[in-house]
Image (tube, rainbow, N blue to C red):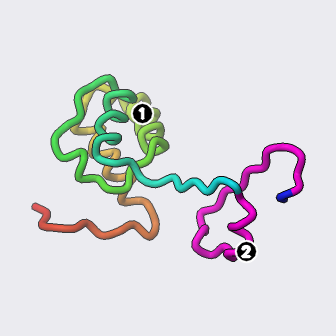
Amino acid sequence: MESHPLPFACTTNFGEHLNPATLRRFVFKVRLDYLTPEQVEEAFRTFFALPPPAGLTDLAALTPGDFAVVHRKAEILGKHAEPDALAGMLRAECEAKPNRLPPIGFRP
């Protein structure tokens, strides 16, 4: 792979299982992680053209793909202008993820 004449990209969900000798062959190592609270609010404004509802930043496992799925789902269900319904759908996307971290702190 290090002698390939064109740009070469690899992706994995199991980077921690790669052999260190393999990792040395990659010039760039990029980690794509969950959105920060600020990015969550910006994504909500971008995808739904609405101000983010209270408590949205408590969701700790959101990605841009989650917003895209909820955007499509909201259009089908006619909930595109309901911030609380959108937040509920985003929460469901987080809860559906395998190996998700348990919430920290007290919950009502």
Q: Residue at x 88, y 52 (%)?
A: 4
Q: Amino acid at mark 1?
A: His
The majority secondary structure of the magenta stretch comes to loop
Which residue type carries mark 2?
Ala
The answer to whether 88 appears left or right of 22 in the picture is left
Give left or right: position of 97 versus 14: left
Residue pictured at 42% horizontal, 39% vertical = 67
Q: Is residue 22 magenta?
A: yes
Quadrant where the C terminus lies? bottom left
- The residue wearing badge 1 is 71
The x and y percentages for residue 69 are 47, 40
Question: How far apart are the alpha carbons under marks 2 and 1?
Answer: 41 Å
Q: Residue 16's mark?
A: none
Compare marks 2 and 1 and give the one earlier in the sequence: 2
Residue 61 screen position, x and y as percent = 37, 55
The residue range painted magenta reads 3-26
Name the residue rendered at 53%, 56% in the picture: 31
In which image quadrant can residue 66 be found? top left
Q: Residues within 10 Å of mark 1 (few under 14, many from 20)?
A: some
Q: Position of residue 100 (x, y in %)?
A: 39, 66
Residue labelled with disc 2: 21
Classify mark 2: helix, strand or loop: helix
In what quadrant of the picture does the N terminus appear? bottom right
Does residue 23 lie above or below 64 as drawn? Answer: below
Label 2: few (<14), some (14–19) or many (≥20) C-alpha neighbours in 10 Å: few
Residue at image location 16% in from the left, 67% down from the top: 105
